[in-house]
Amino acid sequence: MIVWIYKNKKGLLLNDFFSIKRDYTKRYKLYETLLQHYQLKQEAVTYLEFGVAHGASFRWWMQENTNSSSSFFGFDTFEGLPENWGGFYAKGDMKADVPQLNDTRGMFIKGLFQDTLNKFIEEKKELLSSANRRMIHMDADLYSATIFALSQLYPFLKKDDIILFDEFNVPLHEFKAFQEFTASFYVKLKPVAAVNNFYQTAFVVV
Ligand SMILES: C[S@@+](CC[C@H](N)C(=O)[O-])C[C@H]1O[C@@H](n2cnc3c(N)ncnc32)[C@H](O)[C@@H]1O
């Protein structure tokens, strides 16, 4: 991981490496940077979030993007993590009620990604292939969930789509999924901004 950081840390829009303390609220600075740089406020986007829990990041993006043609889809079991996440969290942690939305552009898909995503893709093929920029927010923490979602969405990825990782620098989880995905699908992802020593990292498809 550290080798990757040293290779990739130059020239980013935002990068706080090395910070002594992790500050989770910094992720909103990262989102704000993307919003400004890519002018995402007014753009029509298809936003897919994997790992919603109480909906904090989901709501942020839906509130900030004001285009009426945007769509926001949040995937989660809402029954918590389907397996232990290292020594930090146990299966069932992060259980949450499905958040309430008062914006018709958004919806939640309840269940394991492994059970719901393929049906969703079948139903939304057209939207997923449309001119709207795809924004994929990986916040499921787990290797299994991250590699699964990325590999299913691979056929729809286009240049300039944005992929955000919320726990990127965890070597055996999101980072491992990132490495395997980019190596085995020949997908090129360019890092554009990061906070908390690359814990939260954003990429564009090149
Ligand atoms: C860190 S939380 C999401 C936090 C949220 N994005 C926020 O802004 O605070 C991770 C979520 O991923 C979900 N999750 C992990 N693996 C999953 C899977 N394979 N299928 C469905 N949900 C999963 C868990 O249920 C959990 O709610």
Image (cartoon, rainbow, N blue to C red):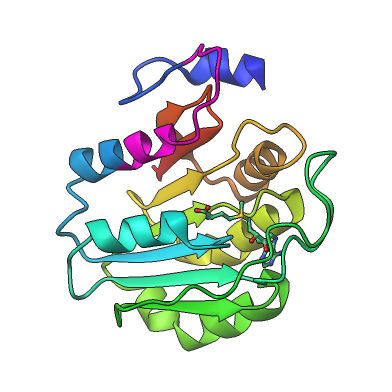
Q: Is residue 25 magenta?
A: yes
Left or right, residue 79 beside residue 120: right
Rendered location of residue 113, percent (x, y): 66, 70
Query: 84 or 118, which lies in front?
Result: 84
Where residue 26 sits in the image (x, y, percent)?
41, 32
Up/down of 56 relative to 74, above or below: above
Does residue 192 appear to the left or right of 19 in the view shown? Answer: left
Q: Is residue 138 above or below residue 113?
A: above
Look at the magenta stretch and give its main secondary structure.
loop
- 178 in the magenta segment: no
Quarter of the view holding residue 190:
top left
Residue 11 location (% of width, % of height)? 34, 18
Q: Is residue 112 visible?
A: yes
Q: Which residue is drawn at 62% across and 67% down?
A: 96
Residue at the (53%, 46%) spot, across then down: 187
Of 113 and 58, nearer the camera is 58
Span of residues in magenta = 17-31
Q: Which of the 4 image quarters holds residue 63?
A: bottom left
Counting from the top left corner in percent of width and height, residue 106 is at: 37, 76
Query: Quarter holding the C terminus?
Result: top left
Can residue 191 be seen in this snapshot?
Answer: no
- Quarter of the figure that contains the N terminus: top right
Count of numbered circles in the view: 0
Residue at figure coordinates x 59%, y 60% from the top left: 51
To which quarter of the image does residue 128 belong?
bottom left
Who's the residue at 42% across and 60% down the image?
58
In screen coordinates, is 30 left or right of 21? left
Name the quarter showing ligand 1: bottom right
Q: Is residue 158 shown left or right of residue 92? A: left
Q: Is residue 52 above or below residue 101?
A: above
